[in-house]
């Protein structure tokens, strides 16, 4: 089976299984499943007709879907989370263009030895849902990405530290796989006559999570992921995702997201994505 469709099948299976299990165990008091499924939709539209000051018609939308299913038991914890984000925009007579697109799944199993330091195993998957394009100055476009192209998987094992529920960090050995069928994301530049479609790296991984409720209606979440290949310890991959969420009313929310990426295999410069969204939100669970 094609790797792309295997990943999609896994995504759907994980969501269905966890939704069923969590709902079935909704009454667990101290131990058992804790669940959260939240989606929000943000819309922006402007239109002009004989407007003397000038302007261009535009329309943009963005959908965010986040879930977190955690099974807490006396001697272990199994945390599963996912993030799906997609949006597009249209300005003037141009066609709709993708503005944001992200799939991320994470599963962490922790064996609870004491109050602070505990061993863990974890797996993470990342990709995008649809094709990505680079838009040229002459009006043409060039496709540079697709579903699971690139796609990233990471597996790690090590020790986690948590003194409270606000900050949690873990450090361990890790494997990182890069999948790329039609684009050179997994290519080794040292092999001039061959374009690789798969790359496996062995190294060390550090993940730090911040979950800080700064006000009764505002939550700041931050995840800093660092990966270093043992063949190039001076080159550290950085994935730092920060989200400030404020619930203005029961169905209206504000989100501010800043994400920083650095991977020398993709770009010699750091990449930054920033998004501000105000729109409707709904908690499914």
Image (cartoon, grey):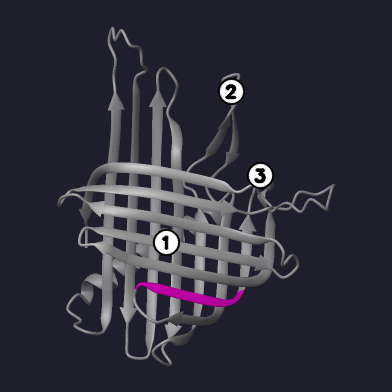
Determine the secondary structure under disc 2.
loop
Q: Is residue 221 left or right of residue 135?
A: left
Q: Main secondary structure of the magenta part?
A: strand
Q: Which region is colored magenta?
A: 166-173
Question: Image quadrant for the C terminus?
Answer: bottom left
Residue 12 % position (x, y): 39, 59
Q: Which residue is mark 2?
A: 140
Q: Which residue is mark 1?
A: 222
Determine the secondary structure under disc 3.
loop
* Residue 6 is at least partly visible in this image: no
Depth-wise, is mark 3 or mark 1 nearer the camera?
A: 1
Q: Which residue is mark 3?
A: 183
Q: Is residue 222 above or below residue 268?
A: below
- How far apart, in angstroms, are the residues tagged by discs 2 and 3? 19 Å
Residue at horizontal 65%, vertical 62%? 236
Q: Is residue 227 left or right of residue 65?
A: right
């Amino acid at each position: 089976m094609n790797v792309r469709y295997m990943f999609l099948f896994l995504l759907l299976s994980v969501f269905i299984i966890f939704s069923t299990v969590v709902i079935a165990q909704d009454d667990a008091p101290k131990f058992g499943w804790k669940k959260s499924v939240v989606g929000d939709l943000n819309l922006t539209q402007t239109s002009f007709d004989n407007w003397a000051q000038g302007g261009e018609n535009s329309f943009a939308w963005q959908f965010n879907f986040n879930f977190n299913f955690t099974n807490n038991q006396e001697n272990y914890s199994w945390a599963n989370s996912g993030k799906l984000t997609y949006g597009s925009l249209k300005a003037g007579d141009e066609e709709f263009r993708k503005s944001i697109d992200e799939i991320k799944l994470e599963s962490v199993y922790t064996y609870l030895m004491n109050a602070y330091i505990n061993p863990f195993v974890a797996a993470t998957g990342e990709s995008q849902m649809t094709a990505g394009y680079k838009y040229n100055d002459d009006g043409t476009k060039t496709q540079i990405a697709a579903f699971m192209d690139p796609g990233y998987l990471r597996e790690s094992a090590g020790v986690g530290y948590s003194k409270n529920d606000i900050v949690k960090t873990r450090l361990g050995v890790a494997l990182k796989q890069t999948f790329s069928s039609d684009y050179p994301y997994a290519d080794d530049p040292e092999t001039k006559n061959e374009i690789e479609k798969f790359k496996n790296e062995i190294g060390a991984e550090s993940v730090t999570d911040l979950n800080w409720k700064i006000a009764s209606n505002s939550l700041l979440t931050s995840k800093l992921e660092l990966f270093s290949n043992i063949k190039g310890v001076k080159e550290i991959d950085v994935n730092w995702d920060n989200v400030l969420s404020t619930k203005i009313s029961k169905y209206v929310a504000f989100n501010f997201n800043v994400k920083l990426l650095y991977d020398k295999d993709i770009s010699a410069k750091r990449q930054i994505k920033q998004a501000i969204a105000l729109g409707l939100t709904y908690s499914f669970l």
